Image (cartoon, rainbow, N blue to C red):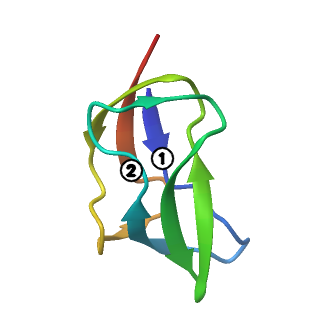
Amino acid sequence: MELRLEALVPEMEFGTVVRWLKQEGDPVEAGEVIVEVEAEKVVQEVSAPAGGTLREIVGVEGDELRVGSVLAIIEEV
């Protein structure tokens, strides 16, 4: 499953990956906060939409991504 950057505020077009709280290969639970993203000068927590394993981090810390871009790949259990 692809974890995509969603608009955290209505006018948001881009977000910057601030910090990953999990690393590739780590187990994640649905609803668990796994990454922090900054938009409009506010840092928001982004949760895993499903449980599984964080297979690949696509958006690395410091990347500015357009809304809808893939942040990570989660392999569901």
Task: Tell me how far mark 2 sits from mark 1, CA to CA.
Answer: 5 Å
Amino acid on which disc 1 is placed: Arg
Please state if 37 lies on the left or on the right of 8 as rendered.
Answer: left
Mark 2 is surrounded, within 10 Å at the Cα level, by few (under 14), some (14 to 19) or many (20 or more) other residues, namely many
Q: Would you identify the image quadrant in which residue 8 lies?
A: bottom right
Q: Is residue 7 above or below residue 27?
A: below
- Locate residue 27 relative to residue 48 in the image: left or right: left
Asked whether, in this view, residue 57 is left or right of residue 71, the answer is left
Instruction: Say which residue appears at 40% left-offset and 53% top-offset.
Output: 69
Counting from the top left corner in percent of width and height, residue 3 is at 47, 40
Residue at position x 66%, y 37% in the image? 31
Residue 67 position (above or below residue 1)? below
At x 27% / y 30%, what residue is drawn?
25
Instruction: Give the residue type at disc 2.
Output: Leu
In the displayed structure, would residue 67 be above or below residue 42? above
Secondary structure at numbered mark 1: strand
* Secondary element type, mark 2: strand
Residue 11 position, x and y percent, is 68, 77
Q: Nearer the viewer, residue 34 or 6?
A: 34
Q: Quadrant of the N terminus?
A: top left
Of the numbered discs in the image, which one, if any, rests on residue 62?
none
Residue under label 2, please give it.
Answer: 71
Is there a contact, CB below 8 Å, between mark 2 and mark 1? yes
Q: Mark 1 — residue?
A: 4
Residue at 56% x, 38% y is 48
* Residue 72 percent across, percent down from the top left: 36, 43
